[in-house]
Amino acid sequence: MKPIWIVDDDQSIRFVLEKALLREGLPTRSFTNPREVLKALDSEEGRDGPQVLVSDIRMPGGSGLDLLATIKQRMPGLPVIIMTAFSDLDSAVSAFQSGAFEYLPKPFDLPKAVELIRRAVDESQREDVAEEKLVEAPEMLGQAPAMQDVFRGIGRLAQSHVTVLITGESGSGKELVAHALHKHSPRANQPFVAINTAAIPKDLLESELFGHERGAFTGAQASRRGRFEQADGGTLFLDEIGDMPFDLQTRLLRVLSDGHFYRVGGHSAVKANVRVIAATHQDLEERVKQGVFREDLFHRLNVIRLRLPALRERREDVPMLARYFLQRSAQQLGVEPKRMAEAAMDKLGQFQFPGNVRQLENICHWLTVMAPSQLIELKDLPPEVLAAGSPTLVAAGDAPTASVAPPLADSAFVPAVSALVAAPAIATGVMWESGLEEEALALLNAGRTDVWDVLTRRFETSLIQAALSTTRGRRIEAAQKLGIGRNTITRKIQELGIGD
């Protein structure tokens, strides 16, 4: 790993941070002023640069803010932590808004300083991996097991001409899968033509698919090729096939059977060598039972089926996708890419995403425009994300349908929380809410001024212990069950002294 660069004219600060970071296995390199840093960056040995830069603001021989501006131009992805005395807080906030990863007030608590630097290292490593992935495979991203199954399916179908049916919720990326199937097929150099059958009026859809002859209907002033002819030799993607009118399904079945069709108003058969990939968010078996979708067409399309998971089924992919969309939005808008704070990313990962990947992309574009600083905080998230995840009352016999909300500073309801985890069928919102209110009133009436911290600590302890008990101590799995990041659960376990 590249070293942590420390810039401060105070030798004691440099010494303390060096020793503390070395105990954590983090290599360091120290400088007394910004000029030395820039000189090191220009030298051969410093060409790769640091993993994280920690700099004071006020030093003889240069300003930390000026150094920040220079570093951001040369190494925009490098996390920079600004150290400052409390009297420099305005400068620190300014630096924060100018792209600093975080600021560290002096005098600082050493363990907290090390933890902050460790978070910056994690962020730097995640950004390195994200940039590498963006270069290697921008077409589709996903590390979740369900997405790996999709990738394996695409790989197996790479050299095939077989018809494929892609199923999945709206916004889950079905057209991306169709593009990938075409790109990795022998037809890659031929046309890829897409049409959404639900977006075109019934009266025009036939002409769109099969073309028409001059004079075939009012307004047909010239002959026109349809999508099948346009895709000759390549791939035709029929999106939302479940919404295709019943009478057109018969014509589509004929094309899939022998490759021949007639233009609207035409009398000569046209042959097209087209691979058809269809997609739908609907249950085609159910539509067959309802009599609105031909059973023979269903079986013709359903040769190979690829199911694309909803985003809520692959939550571990949310951070990677969010970073990718933030970078792409920044590139489109011509601005510096924004980063997301861990708390904001954890909250985003808990969101249900009814609009799936498309909704995440829209959220990231919104954040690129609307978030006030380079680091996206929890409060910067859009209202629909912040409002989501509130506790849901669970009726007897029902399964929970939403994640438990972020901790609300509850403690007396610790037994109720355990009951909620262990036996959701009998848990009710009243149990823990009344316990919370009673405990809070008791502490407030006793004159306590740390009620929030006390109750939050006990609530978080109970949640994490309950999750760890269900996963037999496996932290990553417990974090996934709680809907938080693995770094978050590790930090919380240390802060709360769980297992000590």
Image (spheres, rainbow, N blue to C red):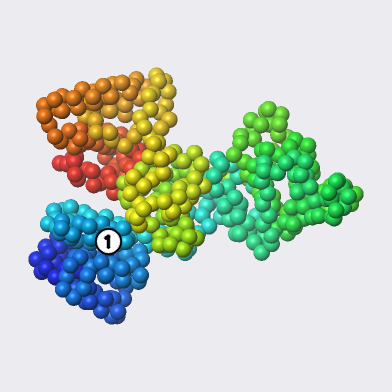
The image position of residue 409, as x and y in percent, is 24, 33
Q: Residue at x 35, y 57 (%)?
A: 374
Q: Quadrant of the C terminus?
A: top left
Q: Nearer the viewer, residue 118 or 73?
A: 73
Closer to the camera in the image, 117 or 418? 117
Question: In the current view of this chain or complex, which residue is farthest to the right?
Answer: 267
Q: Is residue 386 above or below residue 136?
A: above
User: What quarter of the picture does the N terminus occupy?
Assistant: bottom left
Residue 453's spot in the image, x, y percent? 18, 37
Give the side of residue 245 with respect to residue 103, left or right: right
457 lies left or right of 155: left
- Lateral position of residue 470 relative to residue 146, left or right: left
Query: Which residue is tagged 1?
Result: 95
Q: Is residue 235 left or right of residue 419?
A: right
Quarter of the image for residue 70 reads bottom left
Q: Secondary structure at mark 1?
A: helix
In the displayed structure, would residue 87 be above or below residue 203? Answer: below
Which residue corresponds to the image point at 77% horizontal and 55% vertical from the top-left? 229
Q: Amino acid at mark 1?
A: Ala
Above-or-below relation of 305 to 338: above
In this view, which residue lies farthest toward the bottom? 43
* Spot occupied by residue 293 in the image (x, y as percentages of width and height): 71, 34
